[in-house]
Amino acid sequence: MDYNLCSIMLPLVLAGAFVGVIISNILPEAILTIILVIVLFYLTYDSLSKAIGLWKKETIAIEKKKLAYKPLDGGEEKKETEMSGVTPNGGVNTGLNSGSLDNSNTQLIEVSAGGGGG
């Protein structure tokens, strides 16, 4: 618990409560209601303007981050090799997506590094 913050806040809260009790005894309810509505609208406007400003800053930061991770010419090379029928690793492009391959004819080959170091 932050006792320094409590030592600053507590007297102000007590003073505000004391002043609020005195004002509520002096002013009629209609004027109190109007004052409270004005305070509510001001706080709502202030909070919304800060939230919109923060949202704009976050959106700009996200867009900058997206641009920073943009692939460097990898997309153009892929398009050219797909059109020529040859994949970058030297294989032939059949035009099938990796998700549409028939797994019944696929063989897995395990390559071991050899030697059993330990």
Image: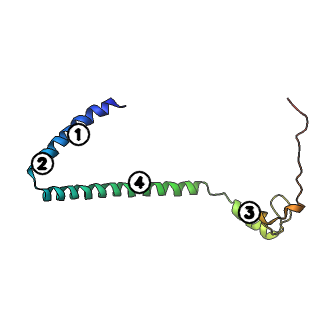
Q: Which residue lies at the image location 70% right of the left edge and 59% below the top edge?
A: 74
Q: Nearer the viewer, residue 59 or 36?
A: 36
The alpha-carbon separation of the residues under discs 2 and 3 comes to 75 Å
Q: Which residue is mark 2?
A: 23
**Spot occupied by residue 89 in the image (x, y as percentages of width and height):** 83, 57
Q: Of the residues shown, which amino acid type is indicated by label 2?
A: Ile
Q: Which residue is mark 1?
A: 13
In this rendering, the answer to whether 5 lies above or below 91 is above
Q: Which colour style is shown?
A: rainbow
The alpha-carbon separation of the residues under discs 3 and 4 comes to 39 Å
Q: Of the residues shown, which amino acid type is indicated by label 1?
A: Val
Foreground disc of the pair 4, 1 = 1
Quadrant in the picture for residue 19: top left
**Spot occupied by residue 34 in the image (x, y as percentages of width and height):** 17, 59
| Mark 1 closeness class: few <14, some 14–19, many ≥20 residues within 10 Å | few
Residue 81 bears which disc, if any?
A: none
The alpha-carbon separation of the residues under discs 1 and 3 comes to 66 Å
Q: Of the residues shown, which amino acid type is indicated by label 4?
A: Leu
| Mark 3 closeness class: few <14, some 14–19, many ≥20 residues within 10 Å | few
What SS does tag 2 mark?
A: helix
Foreground disc of the pair 2, 4 = 2
Q: Which residue is mark 3?
A: 77
Q: Which residue is mark 4?
A: 54
